[in-house]
Amino acid sequence: MREEKRQGVAKKAAAPKHINRNLRTLLSIWVGKTIMSLTRIFGQGGTTLPGRIALKINPQVSAVLSSQLDAGSLIITGTNGKTTTTALINGILKEAGLKCIHNQSGSNLAWGVASTLIESSSWWGRLHQNCAVLEVDEGSFPEVVRNIKPRGIIATNIFRDQLDRFGEIDHIQNSIKKGIENLLENSFKVINADDPSLAGINPANGKNILYYGLELDLPAYPFQNTGRDIKVCPLCSHILTYDKIYFAHLGHYRCEACKYKRPLPAVKLTDCQNDHKNNTTLEISTSDQALKLITPLMGTYNLYNILAAIACALELEIPSKTIIKSLDKAIPSFGRMEPFEYDNKKIVMALIKNPVGTNEVLRTVLTHQDGKVTILIAINDNIADGTDISWLWDADFEQLHNHPDRLDNVIVSGSRAWDMAVRLKYSGLEAGKILVEEEPQHAINKSLEHTDPGGRIFILPNYTAMLELRRELNRMGMGNPYWNREEIL
């Protein structure tokens, strides 16, 4: 039935409001664009400061600009998977013929969203795109929803993250719930059914909800995962019973006390087969069709990202052949298993920022690759990273000790390099395999020195360390700064 519908998604959105180009709005745009140009002249990204200053001049600049989008805006939020899911959705919409605004750098606070919209506009505040696909930080989610009034939201998962900002996990849940309750009545919601904390959110406007989830029998992973943040029912606090656990607390759950259970997903992954080239064939079932596609994206967490993107696209009534065509050529997004190559050595960068994400990245690196690898772990404690790095002790770095045959060396870098070295020592890793280089350039050079031609290096940084290391890789001729890149998908 969806195949017969018109691909012009734009007609489904509400008519845009009249743009109010008053002097205050124009001043905020001019100042934002000027600051962005200057920061990039000096080799910086210009993703935060322009929006921060522009919002001080006119707090409504994002609302004014986004109101011009005739196909509306989509907001992706959650602890892990935002950037990849956003890139996948953006790719599908581009394949469908839409011109999209996309914060591909991953700058996802309110001022990062403002910077993205300002960059996309003309100096006179005119947008020529149809829609915006924006990842948004969980803490900023309610504010951005109020300002932008999105056509739909996609919620990926809830895990412990940035303890200095969020505290315990219920704070993130409350923030996402508040954002959902700020949605317009006709906005749709795409939600991960396998996360009990997300699925347990019962907003007052509980209509137009589409759930997605896994229906797989995956092989058990032998190492005990310490990142299970949700153990009790979100409704009555009784211990949850699981029939299947895919990782952390994501799986098939039920509460024996209040009978709360995982909602039946409308979009579900029913089969998953890996080949020797690290490609994965997926079979996905919906209420009225079956999809089959091949993806190079690795890891169980990416299965959820792909499902979320498909569920959103189906909600927008995009034909399945368009969805498959886009996803078949998807490549890893900014810093998320992003590939580089230097001197016949393959480099892969994978962001880590909390226990669950780190566990799954390590699991993917150590179980989905052939031969030995060099690993560079870079940890900073800047505000954008979360100044509390105690989460390192909750991540399963013991996986490295349990796979000594897979490791050449582990280089640690960043402002908290020595803390990371201590954590690796207590994980059981041999002291001789832990090399400390605090400076990003020196850490990359040492990683290359300790890797044979044809070998593979995995760089595992947190957020600001990722930006520093990417600048060094760019300087060495690998890739381009994100603002000079073609769209990720």
Image (spheres, helix red, strand yellow):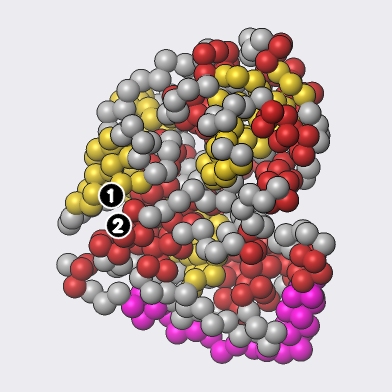
Q: Position of residue 321 (x, y in %)?
A: 25, 62
Frontmost residue, 402 versus 455: 455
Q: Which residue is mark 2?
A: 324
At x 66% / y 73%, what residue is drawn? 119
Which badge, 1 or 2, comes first in the chain's sequence? 1
Q: Is residue 350 above or below residue 83?
A: above
Main SS of residues in magenta: helix
At x 45% / y 51%, what residue is drawn? 331
Q: In which image quadrant can residue 221 be found?
A: top left
Q: Position of residue 142 (x, y in %)?
A: 59, 59
> Residue 197 got which mark?
none
Q: Position of residue 448 (x, y in %)?
A: 67, 32
* Distance CA(mark 1)–CA(mark 2): 6 Å
Q: Disc 1 residue type?
A: Leu
Please say whether residue 326 is one of the residues in the magenta stretch.
no
Numbered range of the magenta stretch: 8-35
Please say whether residue 34 is one of the residues in the magenta stretch.
yes
Q: Position of residue 260 (x, y in %)?
A: 35, 36
Frontmost residue, 483 versus 246: 483
At x 54% / y 70%, what residue is drawn? 101
Asked if residue 141 can be seen in this view, the reply is no
* Disc 1 element: strand
Q: Are marks 1 and 2 in contact (CB under 8 Å)?
A: yes
Q: Which residue is mark 1?
A: 293
Q: Disc 2 residue type?
A: Ile
